[in-house]
Image (spheres, rainbow, N blue to C red):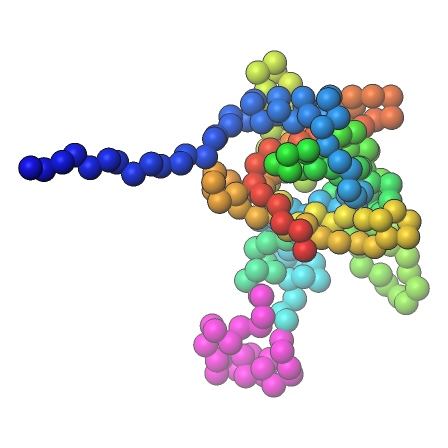
Amino acid sequence: MATATQAPMVIVPQMFRLADKLRIQQERIRNREYRVFSVLTTVVLERQLSTKGLSQAKPRWSNPEQEKIFSKGQASGADAPFSEWQANAWVNLTLDWLGKNGPKLAISADKNDLLLPQGLPPLPTIPDPCWIPKKAGDIAPRVQQDMGTRASGRIYDRTGKMFLLFHPLTELCVLVGGDKGGFGKIKCITDPATRLLPSLLVNPDPMDSKGNMEAYFSSGAFQAG
């Protein structure tokens, strides 16, 4: 006599909508359910932008002989200079606070979320990355970092509040241990449960008199080292 077989138990990870994720982070920050462990100095994100005319677009030959062979048409496409396609198609953009003046980075008490409990301070001016010196000793002029041009898009919450979307993130540079500490990196990786790439949401409207902006890591996973 045949007996019914019990279906295997499947554990489905709990999934959160964006509104739920933001609410959870807001509650943890409000209730101080977190531990600050570093200062965030730089957010690195990847965007598909042309680098034509910039130094990154120049061929990256391994040696002079490789350049001669390729220029004579005696090599296949596989022998093209290292990262030539990538240099022309992708460029890393950053949100850079230039060291210890960056926002405090925290981890929630349950170790499920990276938090920005005090938001993001205004971005300082930085040396112009597109500036080309004319002679030795020339100093690059400083330019304002424009969040709007670095953002990938915009997202609105239920109340109509607008957030700038920064996506995908590739790396977070942090300062740990205070003035006597050192710099470290946090890798931004795809969340294996949701398959979403890491992203950051920033409300550009200041939330206090210091100009700090409300911000949340809304997707992805993070790995120290």
Q: Quadrant of residue 200?
A: top right
Seen as rendered, the residue at the extreme right is: 137
Q: Quadrant of residue 101?
A: top right
**What residue sits 87% from the left and 26% below the top?**
210
Q: Is residue 53 visible?
A: yes
132 left or right of 165?
right
Magenta region includes residue 68: yes
Foreground: 26 or 154?
26
> Residue 47 placed where, x, y %?
60, 47
Instruction: Give coordinates of residue 182: x percent, y percent.
Output: 83, 55
Quadrant assignment for the C terminus: bottom right
Image-based side of 100 in relation to 146, left or right: right
In magenta segment, residue 172: no
Percent position of residue 71, x then y = 55, 79
Q: Residue at x 64, y 82 (%)?
A: 63
Say whether residue 145 is visible. no
Furthest residue toward front: 1
- Residue, x 73% and y 21% (percent of image)? 30
Q: Nearer the viewer, residue 129 or 4?
A: 4
Q: Is residue 70 left or right of residue 222?
A: left
Taking the view exactly as shown, the residue that stands out farthest to the top is: 159
Above/below status of 221 relative to 185: above
Q: Residue 79 placed where, x, y %? A: 51, 76
Instruction: Name the one closer to the observer, 195 or 206.
Output: 195
Q: Quadrant of the N terminus?
A: top left
Q: Measuring 59% from the left and 20% from the top, which residue is drawn there?
A: 157
Determine whether 90 is above or below 36 in the image.
below
Please give the range of residues in magenta.
61-84
